[in-house]
Every structure is written in structure tokens, then in C-alpha cells.
Amino acid sequence: MGCVMSTDGQALSSVIRKDRSDLYKSPGVGDREDWRLPLDAWQRFYLQKSWKTVARKSDQAARTVFLRMLQDNPGLRQKWPRISLLTEEEIPTSPYIKFLGERIFDCLDYIIDNLGDLDHVISELTKLGRQHSDMNVMTPEDVWAIEAAFLAGVQECLEDRFTIKYEEIYSRFIVFVIETMVIGFDPH
């Protein structure tokens, strides 16, 4: 014979165990926290964890991204008066190039750190797009020039850890960033 308390306690214990098991549930493949972010929960997790490696090498990656962007898109060089005055030999060692690359990476670092608040991230990216539009230096097509350069910079930092999985994750991420920024170029 058991008393009422022990049987109620057993029932309560099984309910608590059931509730706890939901807390440890892994995100499923394809589960998205927010439809606006083109990454599922696992991809976001891998992005944020691997970004720590990229952030430790941000000086190297920032320079690579900006140099690659200029190399792949020579017309961009003429859009910045300070860059157009530099010779081919001066560009890789220019403090201004380093400064611009670091600004890009600081922005990306901020975005990745704040992916939990997607409303804020989207607001900041569209505001950044408006600022670039107001400067009358870049067009939306110019912003897209960073995509391949960014992936090259990340690959350089992650080295052999830059697998097809990470290429897909970072590709989805940078496309999200660029698309959201380009929305800010629209005056309406």
C-alpha cells in the first residue's frame, strides 16, 4: 500500500521529467527561429562558433576582403577618392584600406553577435544601406561585390575547417546581410 502522497509524488515526478526533456531537445534540421534569417538553428550555432576563429584573425581577414573586393571589381577603386590616389603597390599596405576592412568586419561582428534580435539587426542593416546610399559613392551592385571577397576572407581564416557546410552557412549569411542592406538603398 502506498500513501496518497507517494503516488502523487510519482505522478508529479514523471511530469517534471517530461517537461525537462523538452528543454534538451536539439533543434531539428531545417528548424528556423525566424523566417527572415536564412539559417536554421544549427547553422546559426555553427556560424556564431566559427566566427570566433574569424574574429581572432579579423585584421588579416579584413585586409583580404577589401583587397579582393578591389581586385575583382576595379571600378570600385575609382569611387573612393583616397583609394584612387594610391598606386597598386601602396594599396596592400595602406592604413586606409586596413581601416575600411576593419569597419566591415566590426559591422559583421556586431550583426553576428546580435542575431538573437533580428528586428534590431534588420533595422541596423537597412540604416547602413541608407547611409551608403546617401554618400552617393556606392550602388546596390557595388555592395554585392563583397560577397565573393567575404567568403575568400573567411576561408583564409578557417583554413581546412572551411568545408562545404561552412561555405553554405557563410554564403547564406552574407547574402542575408547584403540583401537587407540593399533594401536601405530604396528611397521609398
Image (cartoon, helix red, strand yellow):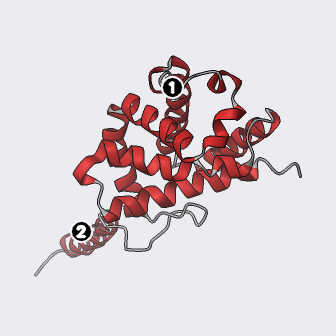
> Could you tell which of marks 2 and 1 lies nearer the N-terminus?
2
The answer to whether 7 is drawn above or below residue 51 in the figure is: below
Label 2 amino acid?
Ser
Q: Residue at x 50, y 20 (%)?
A: 94
Disc 1 element: helix
Label 1 amino acid?
Ile
Residue 71 in the image, given as x and y percentages of width and height: 52, 42
Q: Which residue is mark 1?
A: 91
The answer to whether any part of residue 109 appears in the image is no
Crowd class of label 1 (few under 14; some 14 to 19; many from 20; radius 10 Å): some
Between residue 36 and residue 133, name the one nearer to us. 133
Badge number at residue 16: none
In which quarter of the view is residue 165 placed? bottom left
The answer to whether 123 is drawn above or below residue 106 in the figure is: below
Q: Residue at x 35, y 58 (%)?
A: 166
Q: Which residue is mark 2?
A: 13
**Which residue is at the far bottom?**
1
Disc 2 element: helix
Residue 174 in the image, given as x and y percentages of width and height: 53, 53
**Which residue is at the far right?**
188
Which marked residue is nearer to the observer: mark 2 or mark 1? 1
Between residue 21 and residue 167, name the one nearer to us. 167
Residue 146 in the image, given as x and y percentages of width and height: 56, 47
Q: How many marks?
A: 2
CA distance separating discs 2 and 1: 67 Å
Between residue 186 and residue 14, name the one nearer to us. 186
Q: Residue at x 26, y 75 (%)?
A: 11
The answer to whether 86 is drawn above or below residue 19 in the figure is: above
The answer to whether any part of residue 125 appears in the image is yes
| Figure quadrant of the N terminus | bottom left
Q: Residue at x 42, y 60 (%)?
A: 169
Q: Say whether residue 172 is left or right of residue 129.
A: left
